[in-house]
Image (spheres, helix red, strand yellow):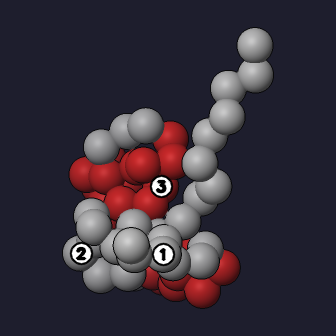
Amino acid sequence: MSETRAPLRRSSRNRVFGGVCGGLGEFFGLKPIWFRIVFVILGIPGGLPGIVPYLILWLVIPEEESG
């Protein structure tokens, strides 16, 4: 009873900036707005706690192949 899940990819369809939140939403089965809210809340106290993790994820997570 193993559930196969698609690999984590940055979304090419559901993106605002880099597709990180869209990809996380598709991977975990949640709406991307929840991840966007988390990154905005983390960015409120000076920006870096929200921007740095987003940029790292943008660099580390490969982009979804369009097709």
In the foreground, 57 or 4: 4
**What kind of residue is marked 3?**
Leu
Circle 2 residues within 10 Å: few <14, some 14–19, many ≥20: few
Left or right: residue 3 compared with residue 21: right
Residue 16 is tagged as 2
Residue assigned mark 1:
65
Secondary structure type for disc 2: loop
Residue at position x 47%, y 55% from top? 24
Q: Position of residue 1 (x, y in %)?
A: 75, 13
Q: CA distance from mark 2 to mark 1?
A: 17 Å
Snapshot quadrant of residue 39:
bottom left
Q: Earlier in the sequence, mark 1 or mark 3?
A: 3
Q: Is residue 45 visible?
A: no
Q: Earlier in the sequence, mark 2 or mark 1?
A: 2
Q: Outermost residue toward the right?
A: 2
Residue 66: percent from the left, percent from the top? Answer: 40, 75
Disc ID at residue 24: 3
Marks 3 and 2, the one that precedes in the sequence: 2
Count numbered badges in the picture.
Answer: 3
Residue type at mark 1 is Glu
Seen from the viewer's position, the closer of residues 3 and 42 is 3
Query: Spatial distance from mark 3 to mark 2, Cα to Cα?
Result: 13 Å
- Given the image, on which type of amino acid does mark 2 rest? Val
Which quadrant: the C terminus?
A: bottom left
Around disc 3, counting alpha carbons within 10 Å, would you say few (fewer than 14), some (14 to 19), or many (20 or more)?
many
Q: Nearer the viewer, residue 37 or 9?
A: 9
Query: CA separation, marks 1 and 3?
Result: 15 Å
